[in-house]
């Protein structure tokens, strides 16, 4: 019985490997961005803020990965790289860039 469950779990992991990799790359990128801000002195170290930053970066990386795959039709490798870069930028920077882009388009 457990052998069947493990086999099903491994099959699902293999099926969604690229998306899982995108989340891990996003978590890594978000962690590096936060630690860079702490090193620059623009932020003080706080474990809760670090965990929140890493978690939001992982989620944002997954969403970016799905957008790149579904809307742009990019390859999984390119989509993982893009999601990692966006997660490293951080949600606030991306929000600022998107706001500027759409306000220019609406004018």
Image (cartoon, grey):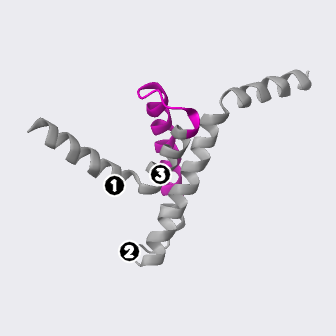
Query: For the residues marked 1 and 2, what is the alpha-carbon distance in whole angstroms?
Result: 15 Å
Under circle 3, the secondary element is helix
| 31 relative to 38, above or below | above
Q: Which residues are magenta?
A: 51-77
Residue 20: horizontal and vertical position, in percent? 63, 38
Residue 54: horizontal and vertical position, in percent? 53, 55
**Residue drawn at 38 percent across, 51 percent down:** 91
Please say if the residues under marks 1 and 2 sit with CB atoms less than 8 Å apart.
no
| Comparing labels 1 and 2, the label whose residue is closer to the camera | 1
Viewer-side residue, 76 vs 65: 76
The N terminus lies in quadrant: top right
Viewer-side residue, 85 vs 38: 85
**Label at residue 42:** 2
**Residue drawn at 34 percent across, 54 percent down:** 92
**Residue drawn at 42 percent across, 29 percent down:** 72
**Residue drawn at 90 percent across, 26 percent down:** 2
Q: Earlier in the sequence, mark 1 or mark 2?
A: 2
Q: According to the image, label 1 marks what residue?
A: 93
Viewer-side residue, 106 vs 52: 106
Residue 32: horizontal and vertical position, in percent? 53, 63
| 36 relative to 2, above or below | below
Residue 17 drawn in magenta: no
């Amino acid at each position: 019985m457990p052998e069947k469950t493990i086999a099903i779990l491994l099959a699902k992991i293999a099926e969604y490997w690229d998306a899982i990799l995108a989340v891990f790359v996003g978590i890594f990128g978000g962690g590096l961005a936060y630690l860079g801000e702490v090193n620059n002195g623009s932020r003080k170290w706080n474990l809760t803020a670090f965990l929140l930053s890493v978690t939001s970066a992982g989620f944002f990386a997954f969403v970016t990965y799905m957008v790149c795959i579904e809307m742009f039709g990019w390859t999984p490798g390119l989509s993982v790289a893009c999601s990692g870069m966006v997660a490293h930028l951080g949600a606030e920077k991306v929000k600022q860039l998107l706001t500027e882009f759409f306000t220019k388009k609406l004018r």
